[in-house]
Amino acid sequence: MWQEEQSGGNLTRTCGDCSLCCTVLRVDELGKLGGSDCVHQNRRGPGCSIHPRRPGICRAYRCLWLSGGLEAGDRPDRLGAVLDVVAEGPLIRLEIRERRPGCFDRSERLVSIADEYRESMPVRITDVAEVLNPSRGYRLLLPKGEEHRVKGDWTEIHKPGETVQRRRLPLLERIVRRISLAVQRVRLRRAMQRMPPTE
Ligand code: SF4
Ligand code: SF4
């Protein structure tokens, strides 16, 4: 998260006026939920008021732009989204976390970045609305214009030139999903109770 020192991967980049990840991302060490401003964000400008003693995750985090993976003009506060290449086991995807719902569709540049990546890895788009709802929806962009819109147990499958298909998760997966959601809801409630008050 917000870094004033230069990134090892790209010696010319610093966060500068951007502090979008300090709002969009979750920081467990601070009890901060994704989508809420961090209480340590500077009030009169970008930056972190506890920079020398910020949590380890904040020291380690570098978004795709800061790591040099996007063009110089693509800083997240200008794009309206924080981008990362995320690995889950052997699978990787481009994660686009919108500052607000609809930022992706309004940005030609974000759409063009997603078009470039979706041919080689899935692109997942999430937003920070309904952050306390662990079952909130997301979009998955796949090669050849295919898109999955996932909401609850249902997925809408859009393919160019074809009728939209709707699929429901099989029963066993629905049961597993509900158990997992119940656990996440408890965790989120606890995280909310631990969150420090904002100024
Ligand atoms: S989103 Fe990227 S550029 Fe912006 S503050 Fe975070 S790490 Fe820095
Ligand atoms: S502690 Fe500092 S770097 Fe970490 S999220 Fe908060 S403002 Fe950002």
Image: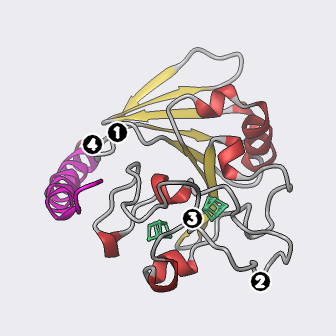
In this view, the residue in front, 159 or 180, is: 180
Looking at the image, tell me whether mark 3 or mark 1 is earlier in sequence order: 3
What amino acid is at disc 3? Answer: Gly
Tell me the crowding category of disc 4: few under 14, some 14 to 19, or many 20 or more residues within 10 angstroms, Cα based: few
In this rendered view, identify the residue nearer to me: 146 or 172: 146
Magenta span contains residue 23: no
| SS for callout 2 | loop
Q: Quick one: SS at disc 1?
A: loop
Q: Where is ligand 1, by quadrant?
A: bottom right
Residue extent of the magenta highlight: 172-199
| CB contact under 8 Å: marks 1 and 4 | yes
Mark 3 or 2 closer to N-term? 2
**Where is residue 51 drawn, in percent x and y?**
51, 78
Q: Main secondary structure of the magenta part?
A: helix
Kindly identify which residue carries mark 4: 133
Q: Earlier in the sequence, mark 4 or mark 2?
A: 2
Indicate which label's residue lies in the foreground, 3 or 1: 3
Return the residue at label 1. Answer: 136
Residue to which mark 2 is pinned: 8
The magenta stretch spans residue 182: yes
The residue that appears at 81% across and 57% down in the rendered structure is: 70
Instruction: Kindly identify the amino acid type of the residue bearing the numbered disc 1.
Output: Arg
Tag in front: 4 or 2:
2
Residue labelled 3 has its Cβ within 8 Å of some atom of ligand 2: yes
| Picture disc at residue 47 | 3
